[in-house]
Amino acid sequence: MAFREDQIARYSRHIILKEVGGRGQEKLLSARVLVIGAGGLGSPVAMYLAAAGVGTIGLVDMDVVDVSNLQRQIMHSQSTVGIPKVVSGARTLSRMNPDVTVVPIQDRLTAENAMELFSGYDVIVDGSDNFGTRYIVNDAAFFLKKTLVSGSILRFEGQVTVLEGHTEAPCYRCLYPEAPPPGLVPSCSEAGVLGVLAGTIGTLQAAEVVKKILGVGELLTGRLLLYDALSMTFRKLRVPKDPHCALCSPKATITTVSGSSEWVCQVPAS
Amino acid sequence: MSVVVRIPTPLRKLTGNQGEVREEGGTVREILDGLESHYPGIRERLTDEAGELRRFINIYLNEEDIRFAEGLDTKVKAGDEVSIIPAIAGGAR
């Protein structure tokens, strides 16, 4: 692939990095990344990937922009309130970088559509807001052997990890075998979230996606990064592959993607 | 043995907003007993009716998940750090 002059200018700070270079930038331009959730986490992920020149970015979200989103969902704005998030997001990304093809998918991710949606992408990013979706995303990524960059936030704390259950690395079910039961948990909007936390965690996810595409550095595979904005501390914990995992171990009992994306985002503890 | 227990924000209502508390005990189970006696109600957030760790809560002893050690019987020693890590799912809305 030959770069146009405007591309050489646009990506010059990448191209001069020896870990990226022209080859790496070509990889980014031909990469396809699917972002689940065009909200708090999806915004910084998609915007940094667009700026980096990731060639195709799919956005999956069924919601429309609400004014209460704007405290943290920086891909959207006052002028896109009432518009589907994936349309609002696609506008922002296309405006940032015309090299990027944005695929807006205004739909809820389900057990039925996950495999088909994921099949055309290299890396999957989970920025969803409920446990049901997180297990669907994990299972579909596993069956299709896709790298999954997972981030989650609540109040002042966030978690980031890279899941590759199809390799020696763990999957989401190795980390959390089961979701909290829906009855125990209050809704997302009741729990609250520090707006800037979405930026911190989403940007870390974007960094992992870029590293995966480039094949450089060490990913958070087998590691869980915890961030506490109140104490401003980062910690990395080890996540082993579970030899009894229901999905990715030799003792697996799950053979297809199933389950529903119920709206649960809290731990049973408030 | 006195160890530091790190409390995640969703559970801090039960600990009077403390993010870190000290407890005595020789195993993780004894640490949880201590927690329950000082902060009643916290145990049912962490363990089920059978006394097993809930499957959406992880407890780490230092950097290691106790599920991959001796579970609640994992031994602790002075100066260790026990962290309670719940699954969280927020992100899009």
Image: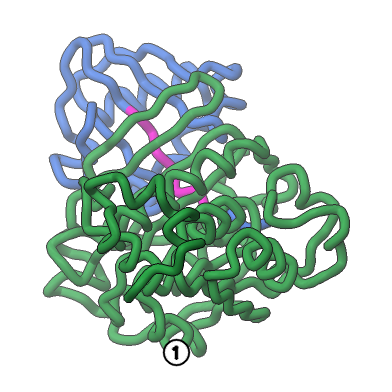
Chain colours: A green, B blue
Q: Relative to A240, does residue A168 appear above or below in the rendering?
A: below
Residue nearest the observer in this picture, A24 or A208: A24
Q: Which quadrant of the figure contains the C terminus of chain A? A: top right
Q: Is residue A130 visible to the viewer in this orientation of the structure?
A: yes
- State the image coordinates of residue B10 (x, y, percent, origin top left): 56, 35
Q: Is residue A214 magenta?
A: no
User: In the image, B20: left or right of A212?
Assistant: right
Q: Relative to A267, does residue B36 appear above or below in the rendering?
A: above
Q: Relative to A150, does residue A124 appear above or below in the rendering?
A: below
Magenta region: which residues?
B83-89
- State the image coordinates of residue A173 (x, y, percent, origin top left): 32, 62
Q: Amino acid at mark 1?
A: Glu
Residue at the extreme front of the image, as rendered: A5
Q: Residue at x 49, y 40 (%)?
A: A158
The number of callouts visible is: 1
Q: Residues within 10 Å of mark 1 (few under 14, many from 20)?
A: few
Q: Residue at x 34, y 61 (%)?
A: A25
Residue position for label 1 = A116
Label 1 chain ID: A
Q: Residue at x 28, y 34 (%)?
A: B60
Q: Which quadrant of the figure contains the N terminus of chain A? A: bottom left
Residue nearest the observer in this picture, A94 or B86: A94
Q: Is residue B86 magenta?
A: yes
- State the image coordinates of residue B65 (x, y, percent, origin top left): 23, 40
Write down the quadrant of residue A137 in the picture. bottom left
